[in-house]
Amino acid sequence: MKTVYKYIRRILPFVLASLCLTSCNDFLTEDPKGQLTSENFFSNKEDLDASLTALYSVIAGSQASNNLCGTNFLVGDDISTHPSSNKQPLREHDQFDVKDNNSWLSSMWEQRFKVIKAANFIINNARRTPDVSDDEIKAAIGQARYWRAYSYFYLVTTWGKVPIMLEEEINYNAPLKTEEEVYELIISDLKIAETDCPIKYTKEPYAKNGFNIAVSRAAVKATMAYVYMCMAGWPLNKGTEYYELAAGKAKEVIDGTENGTYDYKLLDEYSKVYSWEYNNKNTELLLGIYYNRDQTNQAAPLTDFLQDMKQGGWGDTNGEIKFWKEFPEGPRKDATYFPKILLNDGELHDWWYDTNPPSREVVAPVFMKTVEGAVRGTEFDYTNPSLVNAAGEKTFQLIRLSQVYCWYAEATGRSGQINTKAVEVLNKVRNRADGEESDMYKATMSPEELAEAAYNEHGWEMAGYYWGGIASRARDMFRMYRYKDHFEYRKENPEIEVAPGVKRKEIVPVTGTWDDSKMYVPYPYEDAILNPNLK
């Protein structure tokens, strides 16, 4: 597999839009520019647009399958994998025992630096474009800075210390920067993006059907809120001050939605959040990556199917039992997991069904969020035995408004405060999840109770959804230093009563002794050969 260094040495800082997944047809019709250098590429507005087209193409490609967007989500307590088959790259993460020769590790590393390379090309050169307004150049550079920050956020929360690449020339002896230094770059980039990215795009390809396709100001503010939360937690442990910063940024997004600055609002039913109907018109989506399977296959739908399900599946991932058990009943749970699974016998069963003696290799809850209908443009029907096409085109959801509500409530609580707005927006999330106006959270809660309630609600909102690269359940656990507790639980692996008289437990074993090196994954072996600082 190519390393980032090999890639940078032989590939342009941008790729042709026609070769990659993008957000709409306009991104796919730019003229090829060939092997142009940084100095002479930006000759007109079309070149500036082409550089952004290429950046978004790289971004889409970097997230298009789970071996590219990451396997580190498997350390979370919501998701597990198969005990055998060809799932070793996934299983090592699930077992907190990742090797440096993990066959997917170099992809995770490489894809982030591909995005960084494409972003640096714009950041360092876009201002050379003649006869283009300063606002247009700022918007382009703001988007590039956002995606560079996004990529370094992934890197620092996965590997910790990493090299920082700001130029187009690659230093094969680039030193590792501390987590603090990487976060400083992330915040610096996001502050510029916050100022320079538009509130609302009005022209294609950056807007479509009235929705922002590219990075908006609200998306940047929301990202800053979550980054500040991570800085408040492990490993920097900056605490109260940074939780207050996080709450402030989340509140800016919330205020903007309420005063009409931003056009975001919650969908009224959770089942619509990941539906095909709202795939390209999701009013709560602040940032997504949009796909068109006519251009390039996007491998989302089958990954969460068990291998013995009638629809066919790869069996990459499934749900963890304890998390499923503690997940509150209601419409949100019904839309998150398969209510029943259709097995090869053609019958619908509870996920815990097995023969006596046991015959099923994997018995676990199954997530349903990424699945698309067997017929293009239709909703998935779990009772339909038709095979599901592996080439799907569901939008990958990076930030939703419900997450911002949860972040605001959690950050408020963890800063030692509680207020009516935090309780109000958290109730909006829970009321939608339950399908009724229960307002179960009260202003009489303690700040700690508010924070934990918001942490849990965010976990249930995002359960099993690892395609978005900002705030999976695993990343929440990382910043709260809760991997260790989950590691010890998985080692114990108790049986759980999933139905009266029926007990099940996890099938993937976890062994060994905890140490904090398990908080990160090792640097890819191939890259450590090229850069001795990675050893």
Image: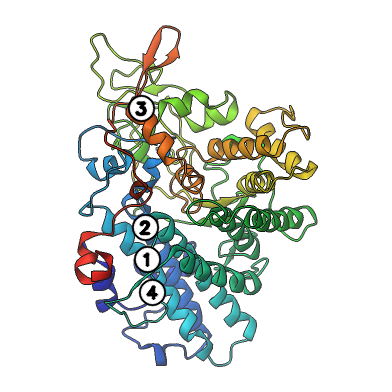
Q: In what quadrant of the picture does the N terminus appear?
A: bottom left
Label 2, residues with CA under 10 Å away: few <14, some 14-19, many ≥20: some
For badge 1, the amino acid type reads Val
Q: Is residue 247 above or below residue 11?
A: above
Using the numbered discs, state the Cα–Cα distance from disc 4 to disc 1 in whole angstroms: 15 Å
Q: Residue at x 42, y 24 (%)?
A: 383
Name the image quarter holding residue 68. Answer: bottom left
List the residue tagged with mark 4.
117
Q: Position of residue 306 (x, y in %)?
A: 32, 30
Viewer-nearest of discs 3 and 1:
1
Label 4 or label 3, whichever comes before in sequence order? 4
For badge 2, the amino acid type reads Trp
Using the numbered discs, state the Cα–Cα distance from disc 4 to disc 2 in whole angstroms: 19 Å
In what element is the residue under mark 1? strand
In what element is the residue under mark 3? loop
List the residue tagged with mark 2.
159
Using the numbered discs, state the Cα–Cα distance from disc 2 to disc 1 in whole angstroms: 7 Å
Label 4 or label 1, whichever comes before in sequence order? 4
Q: Residue at x 57, y 31 (%)?
A: 332
Name the image quarter holding residue 108. Answer: bottom left
List the residue tagged with mark 3.
385
Using the image as rendered, state which of residue 222 and residue 20 is in the foreground. Answer: 222
Label 3 or label 1, whichever comes before in sequence order? 1
In what element is the residue under mark 4? helix
List the residue tagged with mark 1.
162
